[in-house]
Amino acid sequence: MTTDLKDVSAPPDRRRSRTSVTPYLLAAPMFLAVIVALGYPLVRQLLMSFQEFGLRQQFGQPPAWVGLDNYKTVLSDPAMLKVLVRSIAFCLVCMSLTMVVGVGLAALMTAISRWARLVLQVCLLLVWAMPVMVTMTVWQWLFDSRYGVVNWLLSHLGMSGMEGHAWTADPMGLFTVAALIVIWMSIPLVAFMSYAGLSQVPAEVMEAASLDGASAWRRFRSVTLPLVLPVIMIVGLLQIVWDLRVFTQIYVLQQSGGSTEDTNLLGTAVYRLGIGQGNYGVASALATVVLLLTLLLTWKYIATLLGQQKEAADR
């Protein structure tokens, strides 16, 4: 008696084919939503940057194409170049200090007791969850020229001229307060993400380094840091993007006094050109320059991350 053998390989192949397509079908609505939500404004901004688009165009007059004139206006204006340099400097200072403090707190969380770590994490979570305007109000109270705690404390520590000192009246004082606020609001995310990376470092590796006689600093620099470097680079990338387009902190502090011309960053400059002056064409060109500058500053991070992923895949 003979038994017919059936080919059972085809159905699994079809199942694998259907399974391989399913994730893309499930993710398609999300990608379409992202493309519509981000793609249309970006295309609209790029088109507007090549047009003369002002208040008349807002009321129906067709915009005129001006080519690269808006970009020439942005790149040839000395005030805009000062804003550009000022924004890059502010971004790098805030990013560097945020990363140092955030990674330091993450390392501290790995070394302290469970209850101390819980208290620190709750404090960081409260800072992160606080709305921006509430944070701005609290910090403005702290640096108030008449009733601020900071002036009172500095004057009692012997620093002359701090009674009634108006921090936002001069550019350096305003940027000092703004940097403190930006760093304060950014530290929790950096600390939590860095702590998540540090907690994944194998205990066996740290124990082996300790048995070899490596000090705590040497273990952190030579063992821990290389293992969590991808996480730190991703966080640094996000900080550059966020700090380069900071708006709310600068805009609110500008309302407290001082010259807006000397304290404008890219975010407030785009706002004042577009909403304030109705010059949407030049504002769109400046916003496009901000986008290109962000890509330029983050390209090194992205290239390094892609290289690390390729090396990991080759292993």
Image (cartoon, rainbow, N blue to C red):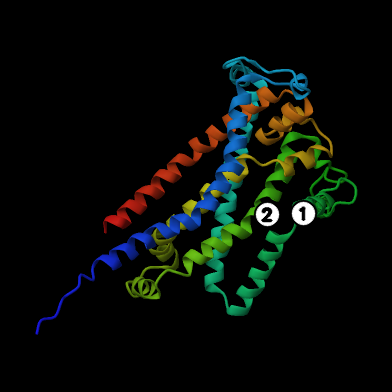
Residue beneath the point at 82% across and 49% down: 140
Q: Amino acid at mark 2?
A: Met
**Quarter that holds the N terminus:** bottom left
Which amino acid type is shown beneath numbered disc 1? Answer: Thr
Say which element carries label 2.
helix
The residue closer to the viewer here, 94 or 1, is: 1
Q: Quadrant of residue 244?
A: top right
Q: Earlier in the sequence, mark 2 or mark 1?
A: 1
User: Residue shown at 55%/64% (left/top)?
Assistant: 106
Residue 79 versus residue 291: which sits nearer the camera? 291
For this orientation, the residue located farthest to the bottom is 1
Asked if residue 93 shows in the view, the reply is no
Residue at the front extreme of this rendering: 1
* Residue pictured at 74% horizontal, 59% vertical: 130
Q: Is residue 118 left or right of residue 13?
A: right
Q: Is residue 199 above or below residue 171?
A: below
> Callout 1: helix, strand or loop?
helix
Q: Is residue 112 above or below residue 36?
A: below
Cβ atoms under marks 2 and 1 closer than 8 Å: yes
Q: Residue at x 62, y 36 (%)?
A: 41
Instruction: Measure the alpha-carbon separation of dots 2 and 1.
Output: 8 Å
Q: Give the quarter of the figure containing the C terminus.
A: bottom left
x and y, in percent, of residue 305 in the image:
41, 50
Q: Position of residue 72 (x, y in %)?
A: 59, 17
Residue that carries the numbered disc 2 in the rendered image: 185
Residue 258 place in picture, x, y as percent: 81, 33
Name the outermost residue toward the left: 1
Q: Where is mark 1, residue-wise?
A: 135
